Image: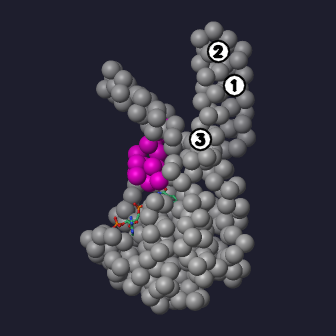
Amino acid sequence: MIDRLCIVGTGLIGGSLARDLRRLGKVGEIVGSSRRAANLERAVALGVIDRFDVDAARAVAGADMVVVAVPLGAIGAVFERVRDAIGNDTVITDVGSAKGGVVAAARAVLGPRLARFVPAHPVAGTEHSGVDSSVERLFECRRVIVTPIPETDADAVERVLAMWKAVGSDVLEMDVDHHDQILAATSHLPHMLAYTLVDVLGRMKDRSEIFRYSAGGLRDFTRVASSDPQMWHDICAENRGPIVEVLERFGAALDRLTDAVRRGDGEYVRSVFTRAKAARDRQF
Ligand code: NAP
C-alpha cells in the first residue's frame, strides 16, 4: 500500500498507473505534477489525481512513492528538482522507454537518494498522449521491466515490483544495457520503420491514391507512426548505439532483399519469407 503517491508527469503512462492504483485501493492520496496547470486541473477533473503542484519539489513532499513519468529528455531535470525534497525512505522510480540515459542522469544527480531509485519500464502504452488518453487496465498482463543497479536498495526494488504487480503486470528484472539492446530491436526499430514507411509513402507523387487504396495491413503496420514525435525523438537520442546497430542490421537485410528482387532471385526471396513466417507463427 502506498500512502502518498506523487506522479511527476501525469500523462498517458502516469495517469493510467494512477487510475489503476486508485481503482484497486492500493494508494491513499495521489499528487500530480507537470509543467501546465491546465493539464493537472484536467487530471483532477478526471479523478486521476487528488491535487497537484506545478513545482515538482513541492509536489513530492511527504510522498512515500514518486513515479517520474515525463518524457525521457526531461527526466534529469526532474531528478534535480526533487532530489532535496524527497524523504530519506521515499522510493523514486521512472517509466522511461530507454534506461541507460536515465540511470546516468540518476547517478549524476540523485546523490544519497540514488539507493532509493529504481529504474523501470512498463512495456505497455498506446500511440496517444496526455491524461485524456489515460485508461484503466493498461498494464494488466503486460510486462514491466525493472533494471536495478548495484546501488539500488533491495527493499526499494521490492516496493516498485509490488506496485506494478498490484496493477496486474508481469514483472521481471533485467540489466540496463541488455534492456536497451532488446528494446531497440522489439520496440524502437518497429517505430523507426513505421515512421519512415509513412514518411516515404506520404511524400510520393501518388500519395493520396496510395493511402486511399491501402488495405488494413498498412494501417495495422503503421499504427505506431501516430505516436508522439517528441517522445520518439527522445528515445532515439537516449538509445543511439543500440538503435543504430539494429537499424544497420535491418538496412543490410533490406539491401540484400532489394538486390534479390532486382535479380529475380526467387529462391532467396522465398527463403526470407518462409523463415520469417515460421518465426512469427512460432512466437505469436
Ligand atoms: P505523455 O502522455 O505526453 O505524458 C507526459 C507527461 O509529462 C505530461 O503530463 C506532461 O505534462 C509532463 N511533462 C512533459 N515535460 C515535462 C517537464 N519538463 N517537467 C514536468 N512534466 C513534464 O507521455 P507518455 O506517453 O505518458 O510518456 C511518458 C514516459 O513514459 C516517457 O518517458 C516514455 O518514454 C515512457 N513510456 C511511454 C510509453 C507509451 O507507449 N507512450 C510506453 C512506455 C513508457 P505537461 O505538458 O503539463 O508538462
Asked if residue 174 is positioned above or below residue 84 in the image, the reply reads above
Label 1 with label 3: CB-CB less than 8 Å: no
Residue 55 vs residue 127, the one in the foreground: 55
Tell me if label 2 and label 3 are in contact, CB under 8 Å. Answer: no
From the image, tell me which residue sits under label 2: 260
Main SS, magenta residues: helix
Q: Residues within 10 Å of mark 2 (few under 14, many from 20)?
A: some
Horizontal and vertical percent for residue 10?
A: 40, 70
Q: Look at label 1 and name its amino acid.
A: Val
Mark 2 / mark 3, whichever is N-terminal: 3
Question: Which residue is tagged 1?
Answer: 272
What residue type is disc 3 on? Val
Instruction: Tell me which image quadrant ligand 1 sits in.
Output: bottom left
User: Quadrant where the N terminus lies?
Assistant: bottom right
Which circle, 2 or 3, is nearer the viewer? Answer: 3
Q: Few, some or many C-alpha atoms within 10 Å of disc 1 (few <14, some 14-19, many ≥20)?
A: few
Rendering quarter of residue 133: bottom left
Tell me the residue at 65%/21% (across/down): 256
Does the segment drawn in magenta span residue 114?
no
Q: Position of residue 165 (x, y in %)?
A: 63, 73
- Real-space CA distance between mark 1 and mark 2, rounded to the nearest whole angstrom: 10 Å
Q: Which mark is residue 244?
A: 3
Could you tell which of marks 1 and 3 lies nearer the N-terminus? 3
* Upstream in sequence: badge 1 or badge 2: 2
Query: In this orientation, which residue lies closer to the viewer: 22 or 57?
Result: 57
